[in-house]
Amino acid sequence: MQFLYHVSCKGSPARLYQLADGTFQIMEDGEITPLMVGFEYVLIDSAFAEYIEELELVGVHIADATIYDPRRKEEIRSYKQLKIDQRFSSGMIRDLDLEGERFLLMDDTYLFVSPDLRRRLESSPFRYLQFTEGLSEFAV
């Protein structure tokens, strides 16, 4: 049986909120990390975005993103939004197609990858990525 893997970033990523104009505003203290995932968003730094674009993954689209830091009153434009077509709820986890390299989004909030994509990302230069098997990181 294959398992999917939850993806997170080392550190304490800032929590963001998407404003009506599409900008992502920092809501709480935290770091601007290379990967930030929250409700209805996955933001990645430009270097990781270039790497993902080269993989030409099915069901993955990359769009420009702007992060606004209200404390510093500055905009950060070095991030991209990772838009993922394959979505699921936690109850569907046993019925997922995990063949090939793919990103998946659970409950519009949690980023997962297939086993094949996890292997590729683990051998990539992006050492800040962390992987946990299945829902082991989540309270049941």
Image (tube, rainbow, N blue to C red):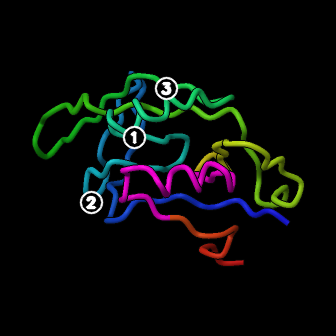
Q: Residue furthest front?
A: 123
- Picture coordinates of residue 118 (x, y %)? 59, 55
Q: Which mark is residue 107?
A: none
- Picture coordinates of residue 89 (x, y %)? 77, 53
In-front residue for pair 54/34:
54
Amino acid on which the number 3 mark rests in the picture: Ile
Q: Earlier in the sequence, mark 3 or mark 2?
A: 2
| Residue bearing mark 2 | 30
Q: Earlier in the sequence, mark 1 or mark 3?
A: 1
| Residue bearing mark 1 | 44
Q: Indicate whether 21 appears above or below 34.
A: above
Image: magenta residue range: 110-130
- Spatial CA distance of label 2 from label 1 is 15 Å
- Picture coordinates of residue 60 (x, y %)? 61, 30
Please identify the quadrant where the C terminus is shown: bottom right
- Picture coordinates of residue 36 (x, y %)? 40, 49
For disc 1, the neighbor class at 10 Å (few under 14, some 14 to 19, many from 20) is many
Q: Residue furthest left?
A: 72
Check if mark 3's residue and mark 2's residue have beta carbons within 8 Å. Answer: no
SS category of the residue bearing label 3: strand
Q: Which mark is residue 62?
A: 3
